[in-house]
Image (cartoon, grey):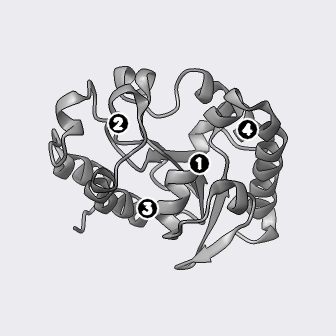
Amino acid sequence: MISRDLHELREALGDCHRCPLGDTRTTLVFGVGDSCARVMLVGEAPGRNEDLEGEPFVGAAGRLLDELLSSAGLSRGDIYIANVLKCRPPKNRDPKRDEIECCAPFLREQIRLIDPAVVVTLGNYATRSLLDTKAGITTLHGRPVDIDGRTVLPVFHPAATIYDRTKRDDLFADFAMLGTLLSGGGA
C-alpha cells in the first residue's frame, strides 16, 4: 500500500472492518499531529476515552504524556501520535496477533509518510511490533535502536507508570534521552 499523504491513507482505511474490532469500537483512532514531525510516538491501542474522542492519548495518560513531552522540550504540536491498533479492544484487553497484523500496513505507511527521525514506542506491544522482538519493555526501554535510517526509542507506556509509580523515573529519564537525541545526540 502506497499513499501520497496521510489524508489519502486515512481514506484508504475508511470505516475499517478488516478485523472484528471494527464492530465493537465507537471511533476509529487514526492518529494526530504534525505530518512532518521529527518525532512519532506509537502506542498500543485506543482506550475508552480515545475511542470516544477519536484521538490518541487523552485522559490521565495523555496529561502525563504532555508532561513528558515538555520535559524533552516538545509539545503535541511538534510530534505525531498513532497506535499499533486503530480500534479499541473490548474492555481494554491486550491486542491479538491478527488484529496487529491487520493494522500493521497502515502504521508502516504512517511511519513512511511522516518519515520521523525518531519513533518512540510506548510499551510492550508497540515495541515488540516495531522491533520485531519478543523481548519486553522492561529490558528494552531507554535503549535506542537504529532501523532503516531512523532511531527507535522504546519507553514504558505512560499508563503503566500511572499504575506502577516505580517506573515513573525511568520514563522521565527515557524522555530526557529523547531530548538529547533531538538536540544533536543522534537523531
Gap in angstroms between the C-alphas marked 2 and 3: 16 Å
Callout 4 crowding tier (Cα within 10 Å): few <14, some 14–19, many ≥20? many
Q: Earlier in the sequence, mark 1 or mark 3?
A: 3
Marks 1 and 3 close (CB-CB < 8 Å) = no
Residue of label 2:
29
Query: Residue 150 sits in which quadrant?
Result: bottom right
Gap in angstroms between the C-alphas marked 4 and 1: 12 Å
Residue of label 1:
122
Gap in angstroms between the C-alphas marked 4 and 2: 22 Å
What is the number of the mark on residue 68? 4
Residue of label 3:
111
Q: Is residue 115 above or below residue 17?
A: below
Q: Is residue 59 above or below residue 125?
A: above
Marks 4 and 2 close (CB-CB < 8 Å) = no
Callout 3 crowding tier (Cα within 10 Å): few <14, some 14–19, many ≥20? some
Q: Residue at x 65, y 36 (%)?
A: 160
Marks 4 and 1 close (CB-CB < 8 Å) = no
Three-letter code for the amino acid on which mark 2 is drawn: Val
Q: Residue at x 75, y 59 (%)?
A: 142
Marks 2 and 1 close (CB-CB < 8 Å) = no
Three-letter code for the amino acid on which mark 3 is drawn: Ile
Three-letter code for the amino acid on which mark 1 is drawn: Leu
Q: Report the residue that reaches farthest toward the bottom.
A: 148
Q: Earlier in the sequence, mark 2 or mark 1?
A: 2
* Nearest the eye: 167 or 46: 167
Q: Earlier in the sequence, mark 4 or mark 2?
A: 2
Gap in angstroms between the C-alphas marked 2 and 1: 16 Å
Gap in angstroms between the C-alphas marked 3 and 4: 21 Å
Three-letter code for the amino acid on which mark 4 is drawn: Leu
Give coordinates of residue 4: x percent, y percent. Answer: 26, 63
* Nearest the eye: 93 or 13: 93
